[in-house]
């Protein structure tokens, strides 16, 4: 049921992607504001209380709903899995921007490519070269594939019903929503716990995704770059994904970029050649091979469990 629910949810999301802003982000943002109004006095401990109230309560409610539906009929429980996964995953979200960027670079439309990468990252890249745009697109795709797909799948498998997918999606949202305001004196330390909680929940999934990138790509370079380069990146989790992904692809990521009218210095991730549209295509292949590997492992686990009974 786990594997089938995942496949159906991802297929539906590919065929009819959900308007994320309207059906996911906007309601969650309103919920976050509700929690802030009632709990935020600038202290980290009250942020922890708000996080537990929101994330654990909704996660438990999801698990409870799943078990009730299972006792009514297993098909209802499976349908519930599909709906929750449809709302919490986002494979199509990354492929839409990525495909448009790749096409723009292949057609030599650099201004349009700059506009697209700027819209994706929420920053200006008017002075970026085609290689910089391709590099940034690959970086965004590797990180988004992990956060929107592979980490969600990990927690979906680990916890009962679809509660793990809800847990991870909420934890990531509250980290992004509240971490962006941590420098605001009025907001205080309210978001500290959300940031630490998400880092803890993402610790194992990010390493499993990096390992999968290496397995389906250039294993030796993927592991080497992971060990030698990941710690140089400001965000350790992103550094692991970029270093292993760049090594597995044989492309250089990171490095200085033009962003919002200035040059931003960044360490080099990965090894090999300069990024271009061809490496963007290779990135799509790496992500799909990783997904196939995940499905294959789930199928083997399902067969082993069936044989064991």
Image (cartoon, rainbow, N blue to C red):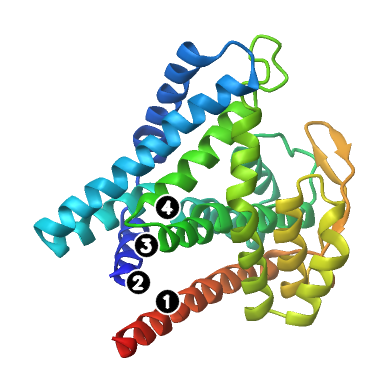
- Label 3 SS: helix
The tag earlier along the polypeptide, 4 or 2, is 2
Q: Camera-side residue: 202 or 29?
A: 202
Q: Judge the density around disc 3: few (<14), some (14-19), many (≥20) Cα neighbours within 10 Å.
A: many
Q: Mark 1 points at which residue?
A: 298
User: What is the quadrant of the C terminus in the image?
Assistant: bottom left
Query: Residue 161: x percent and y percent?
Result: 32, 57
Q: Name the residue under label 3.
A: 10
Q: Which residue is drawn at 78% across and 71% down?
A: 247
State left or right for residue 100 relative to residue 71. right
Query: Pointer 4 and pointer 2: residues touching (CB < 8 Å)?
Result: no
The tag earlier along the polypeptide, 2 or 1, is 2
Q: Judge the density around disc 2: few (<14), some (14-19), many (≥20) Cα neighbours within 10 Å.
A: some
Query: Pointer 2 and pointer 3: residues touching (CB < 8 Å)?
Result: no
Q: Name the residue under label 4.
A: 164
Q: Camera-side residue: 253 or 185?
A: 185
The tag earlier along the polypeptide, 2 or 3, is 2
Observer-side mark, 2 or 3, equals 2
- Label 4 SS: helix
Query: Pointer 4 and pointer 3: residues touching (CB < 8 Å)?
Result: no
The tag earlier along the polypeptide, 3 or 1, is 3
Label 2 – label 3 distance at C-alpha: 11 Å
**Is any part of residue 239 visible from this angle?**
yes
- Label 2 SS: helix
Label 3 – label 1 distance at C-alpha: 15 Å
Query: Pointer 3 and pointer 1: residues touching (CB < 8 Å)?
Result: no
Label 4 – label 2 distance at C-alpha: 15 Å
Label 2 – label 1 distance at C-alpha: 6 Å
The tag earlier along the polypeptide, 4 or 3, is 3
Query: Residue 98: x percent and y percent?
Result: 57, 56
Q: Mark 2 points at which residue?
A: 3
Q: Which residue is drawn at 43% across and 29% down?
A: 53
């Amino acid at each position: 049921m786990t594997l089938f629910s995942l496949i159906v949810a991802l297929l539906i999301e590919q065929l009819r992607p959900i308007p994320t802003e309207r059906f996911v982000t906007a309601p969650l943002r309103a919920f976050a504001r509700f929690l802030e109004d009632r709990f935020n006095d600038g202290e980290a401990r009250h942020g922890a209380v708000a996080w537990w109230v929101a994330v654990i309560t909704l996660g438990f409610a999801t698990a409870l709903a799943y078990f009730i539906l299972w006792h009514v009929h297993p098909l209802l429980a499976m349908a519930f899995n599909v709906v929750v996964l449809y709302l919490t995953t986002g494979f199509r979200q990354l492929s839409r921007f990525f495909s448009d960027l790749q096409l723009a670079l292949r057609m030599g439309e650099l201004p349009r490519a700059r506009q697209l990468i700027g819209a994706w990252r929420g920053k200006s890249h008017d002075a970026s070269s085609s290689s910089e745009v391709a590099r940034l697109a690959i970086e965004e795709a590797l990180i988004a594939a992990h956060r929107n797909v592979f980490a969600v799948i990990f927690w979906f498998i680990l916890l009962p019903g679809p509660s793990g997918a809800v847990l991870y999606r909420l934890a990531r949202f509250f980290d992004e929503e509240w971490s962006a305001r941590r420098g605001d004196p009025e907001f205080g330390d309210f978001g500290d716990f959300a940031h630490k909680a998400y880092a803890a929940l993402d610790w194992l999934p990010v390493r499993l995704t990096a390992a999968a990138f290496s397995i389906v790509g250039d294993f030796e370079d993927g592991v080497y770059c992971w060990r030698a380069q990941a710690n140089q990146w400001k965000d350790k989790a992103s550094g692991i994904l970029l270093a292993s992904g760049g090594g597995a692809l044989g492309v250089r990521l990171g490095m200085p970029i033009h962003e919002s009218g200035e040059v931003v210095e960044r360490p080099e991730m990965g090894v090999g050649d300069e990024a271009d549209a061809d490496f963007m295509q290779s990135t799509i292949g790496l992500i799909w091979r990783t997904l196939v590997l995940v499905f294959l492992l789930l199928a083997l686990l399902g067969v082993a469990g069936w044989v064991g009974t």
